[in-house]
Amino acid sequence: MKPEPQPRRRRAFSLVEVLAAVSIIGIIAFLAIPNIVAIKQDSERNLAISRAEALNMAVVSYIQSNGKNNVASTWSSLNDQQRYTLLIPYLSFAPANLTEFIPNGYSVTLPGNLNSLTKSILTDTSTSTAISY
């Protein structure tokens, strides 16, 4: 008579090993997520500052191209969106709306008077505070 074959023993992880691995992954995620959120907020703030500086450079280019006396008189009567529309040719890959150019959570106010050239005002809308850059 033939001996009966021994059933193969399955190789697998025990429940304790799986629970240990899941808990380690959970601890790592718990430690990493706040850092990821902070990095995202910092990068959005840096993008908003970069875009505000690009607007400032576009204003200067616009003045240089068209002459300060020619543009200063009409500039003050325009709203921010109309001013932004004038600056689009001086910006790289700019969308049609100013609200799309500045990241969510931030707003920008372009200088109202070109006679005394000032920087755009960048505001954090969640705290309503101006950001100095």
Image (spheres, rainbow, N blue to C red):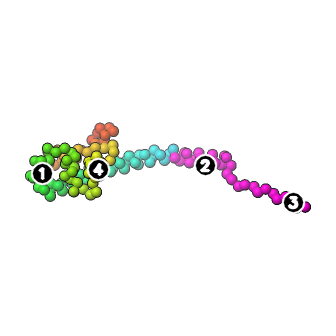
Tell me the quarter of the picture where residue 105 sits. top left
26 is within the stretch colored magenta: yes
Q: CA distance from mark 1 to mark 3?
A: 101 Å
Above-or-below relation of 61 to 20: below
What residue is rendered at 33% in x and 50% in y? 46
**Which label belongs to residue 87?**
none
Residue pointed to by mark 2 = 21
Task: Give the number of the mark in front: 1 or 3.
Answer: 3
Amino acid found under the numbered disc labelled 4: Phe
Say whether disc 1 or disc 3 marks the residue closer to the N-terminus: 3
Residue pointed to by mark 4 = 101
Say whether disc 2 or disc 3 marks the residue closer to the N-terminus: 3
Amino acid found under the numbered disc labelled 2: Ala
- Taking the image as shown, residue 21 lies to the left or right of residue 6, namely left
Q: CA distance from mark 2 to mark 1?
A: 66 Å
**Where is residue 45 drawn, in percent x and y?**
33, 47
Q: Is residue 53 visible?
A: no
**Where is residue 39 drawn, in percent x and y?**
41, 48
Residue pointed to by mark 1 = 71
SS at mark 1 in the image = helix
SS at mark 2 in the image = helix
The residues colored magenta run 1-29
Do labels 2 and 1 touch, CB within 8 Å? no
- Asked whether 37 or 2 is in front, the reply is 2
Residue pointed to by mark 3 = 3
Number of residues whose C-alpha sits closer than 10 Å to that of mark 1, classed few (under 14), some (14–19) or many (20 or more): some
Amino acid found under the numbered disc labelled 3: Pro
What residue is rendered at 79% in x and 56% in y? 7
Determine the residue located farthest toward the left in the rendered image: 69
